[in-house]
Amino acid sequence: MYTLLGFAQKAGNVKTGEEVIRGAIGKKSAALLLIACDAPDEIKRKMAALARARGLPAVLWADKATMGTAIGKSPRNAALIMDRKMAVAMLDCKTTGARLLNNDMEIWGCADDEDQSV
């Protein structure tokens, strides 16, 4: 997942930042929203609701520092994948332990899966 996120960034298919994501999430090419496990609860709720409203899959993945490092940037609360093929590859590499959270959100690679709520 980490490597795929880096590839997506190099290809110009990753959007970050709350306002940038809000503007891009309605575009046809928006494919997958990754939200950091340690993002503030308010950000998690807002991002998850935005993804749900657009019918976009949203996943809790890793922490802010890992997400930022994967794309060569500072820590990030969320990343929007803008390429469907890349999103499918990311969804295909999920762990068997992933579970749905509040109908739409999945948790991958969060240290404390039990305490996550959105």
Image: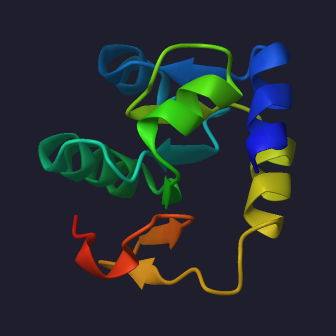
Q: Is residue 102 left or right of residue 62?
A: left
Q: Quadrant of residue 86?
A: top right
Residue 31 in the image: state x and y as whole percent.
Answer: 64, 44
| Residue under the image location 81 percent in, 65 percent down | 93
Residue 106 in the image: state x and y as whole percent.
Answer: 48, 71
**Front residue of this view, candidates 99 and 69:** 69
Count of all numbered marks drawn on residues in the image: 0
| Residue under the image location 43 percent in, 36 percent down | 64
| Residue under the image location 50 percent in, 84 percent down | 99
| Residue under the image location 86 percent in, 28 percent down | 7
Q: Quadrant of residue 73?
A: top right
Q: How is the image coloured?
A: rainbow
Q: Is residue 1 above or below residue 106?
A: above
* Quadrant of the frame with the C terminus: bottom left
Residue 112 in the image: state x and y as whole percent.
Answer: 36, 72
Residue 19 in the image: state x and y as whole percent.
Answer: 31, 16
**Front residue of this view, candidates 76 and 104:** 76
**Front residue of this view, candidates 114 and 21:** 114
Q: Is residue 43 left or right of residue 96?
A: left
Q: Residue furthest left?
A: 42
Q: Is residue 77 left or right of residue 40?
A: right
Q: Is residue 39 above or below residue 88?
A: above
